[in-house]
Image (cartoon, grey):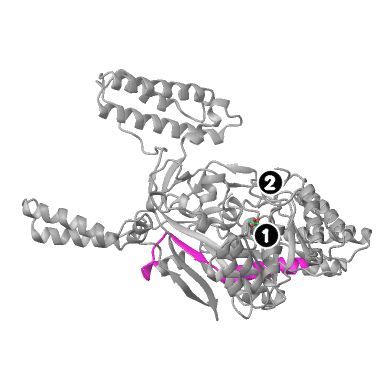
Amino acid sequence: MSWTINSAREMYSIDQWGQDYFNINEQGEVVVNLSDDNGVVTPVSLSKIVQDQDERGRPVPLLLRFRNLLDRRIEALNQAFLQAIDKANYQGEYRGVYPIKVNQQQQVIEEISDFGGKYHYGLEAGSKPELLIALAHLKDPEALLICNGYKDNEFIDLALKASQTGQRIVLVVEMPSEVDAILDRAEALGIKPMLGIRFRLSAKSEGHWAESGGDRSTFGLNTAQLIDAIDRLRERGALEQLQLFHYHQGSQLPNIRVIREACLEAVRVYVNLVKEGAPMGILDMGGGLAIDYDGSQTNFISSCNYGLKEYATDLVEIVQNACDAAGISHPTLVTESGRAVVAHYSVLAFNVLDVTDFKEHEVPEAPAADAPQMLRYLWEIQNRVSPEKPHLLQECFNDALFYRDQIRSLFTNGVVDLRTRAQGEKIYWYTITKIAEVLPQLNEVPEDLATLESNLISFYYANFSVFQSLPDQWAIDQLFPIMPLQRLDEEPSQQAILADITCDCDGKVDQFIDVKGAKRHLPIHRPKLGENYLIGAFLVGAYQETLGDLHNLLGDPHVVSVAVEDGEVIYTNEVEGDTVADVLSYVEYEPKTIEKQFRAIAEKAVQKEKITAKQRRDLMDSFRATLNGYTYYEQD
Ligand SMILES: *Cc1c(COP(=O)(O)O)cnc(C)c1O
């Protein structure tokens, strides 16, 4: 069957993880579908964006941000709950809050409070910096500002005082000592804040963050502590301020069954708190709403076996049933969904710098008649590889391996020279490639040969840092959709793993999404001579930016926000990536001092007549250009 862009859609599962946000156009390029203020959708080619930015002096690696996708995610989440509530005739409301830690960028927070305004979308802060961000951005008095995390007096005081502005600020008790800490400050200031309490569910969690919930999680009160806290609140006459019950199972929960179980347990506790005499009114079910990164719709860790609609419907139904049975009113539902709201927002684009290919298609030079015997034997093997003689393949493979190793040990023992060894390896790879190409024509592949393809996977050297831009890929084997941005109307001829430009052997991507689990290589084209071959890493809007680090002192990439207006692409919020001077200053070098030190060294070289004064000037120009340049590989 001939290759079409539909074959590419299927190969990279773009319809599944990309939904209607990303697609492939007739020219074989990946596009993002952006809608303007009137809802008119324009597909924009990502490679075109990269080219436009390159011309403006911002080369790859380049982080693309799409405000419109963020808006659509906010809308999708809120609509899912509104519809579920409407359908079930649920009597409470939905008031989502966005957990700032998931992506703290100013543009994200601004969009949450502006665009989210119509849904009274709120913010969740887990630290003092995040509290400041939330206070400065929330304008809607209906929206919630939920304070999680460990709180010192400074944090507590600010939250208390700010609550007097009329903002609905909830201080959530995260650990037993916080009951008194908060009440002491509240009494001192004469303020009666809205209080919440975080509970440690016993329901088991799943996925990467399974430990975030359950008996051994570090956050929240266990059952005995919860009862103590209730008693303490009552004793101090503050039980009437307890309005919110909170739990958080962890992020990227792949299995809806686990989410439902936790909700069931939580709503029971909620009902009991009402029975204890607390006013309550708000049930905060935390984050965890997952993204289907690999498009498989399974309970695999990089996927999820449910959608937004099912998530909302299930939670509404569970809470409704439990409250109806207990005869209490339906609470306001809160989720702290972060990943599901911001993942689509960013895409990292980078280019391929070089390729190490193991496949050898070119017929190697035949060994001369007087060449070492092992080399001549090796040469004969490749002649025997043919689809007509499948029974010989296994033997050919064994022999090729044997003679190659023989030649290697002859080299080690000083019998043959480096050139001979190189010729041997060339013939070896040529033979293996030939065998690999015959395999698909066989009905049955011998077991030993089944893994042969994996020996032929190419290394593609890619201009980015896994540690800086995809830290979760490195740290917890989280998979992101990664695919070429162009030539998708052409069948990829290679299988590759991506090596980044850090000098760390962990700096690579060798696990890729697949609907059947993960696969070890990415189907990819061979870059053409002079082509700026581009790859995109998608759904990187959640967690990756600030978790990333400065390994090898590779800094932040350039950033651009892309939108459409009247069918035209517009670029806003262009942020320069780190310069070399920037990253040096992060590790406490003073760029001016470094330059001065090196100038002295150069001057000494002039005095010793190793270089001329003119050469010194030239050298210092290069030094300064590097200091002010990009930390990534720059194409001339
Ligand atoms: C991290 C965190 C979240 C966000 O979780 P997601 O899985 O990104 O939705 C929500 N609530 C709390 C308390 C968190 O710590």
- Residue 75: image location, x then y, percent: 69, 70
| SS class, disc 1 | helix
- Residue 270: image location, x then y, percent: 83, 58
Q: Which of 433 and 474 is in front in this view?
A: 474
Verify whether residue 56 appears in magenta: yes
* Image quadrant in which the C terminus is located: bottom left
Q: Nearer the viewer, residue 210 or 326?
A: 326
Mark 1: which amino acid?
Answer: Ala
Q: What stretch is highlighted in magenta?
A: 54-81
Image disc number at residue 217: 2
Residue under the point 44% across and 51% down: 465
| SS class, disc 2 | loop
Q: Is mark 1 within 8 Å of ligand 1?
A: no
Residue under the point 63% across and 48% down: 302
Horizontally, is 270 left or right of 614 in the view? right
Q: Which secondary structure class fits the magenta region best?
A: helix
Instruction: Count every numbered label the image shows and give the total.
Output: 2
- Residue 280: image location, x then y, percent: 82, 64
- Residue 549: image location, x then y, percent: 46, 53
Mark 2: which amino acid?
Answer: Ser
Specify whether residue 471 is in view: yes
Specify whether residue 287 is in view: no
Give the quarter the ligand 1 occupies.
Answer: bottom right
Verify whether residue 205 appears in magenta: no
Q: Where on the picture, by quarter, is residue 363?
A: top left
Circle 1 sits on which residue? 181
Vertical arrangement, residue 200 with respect to residue 105, above or below: above
Residue under the point 41% across and 20% down: 402
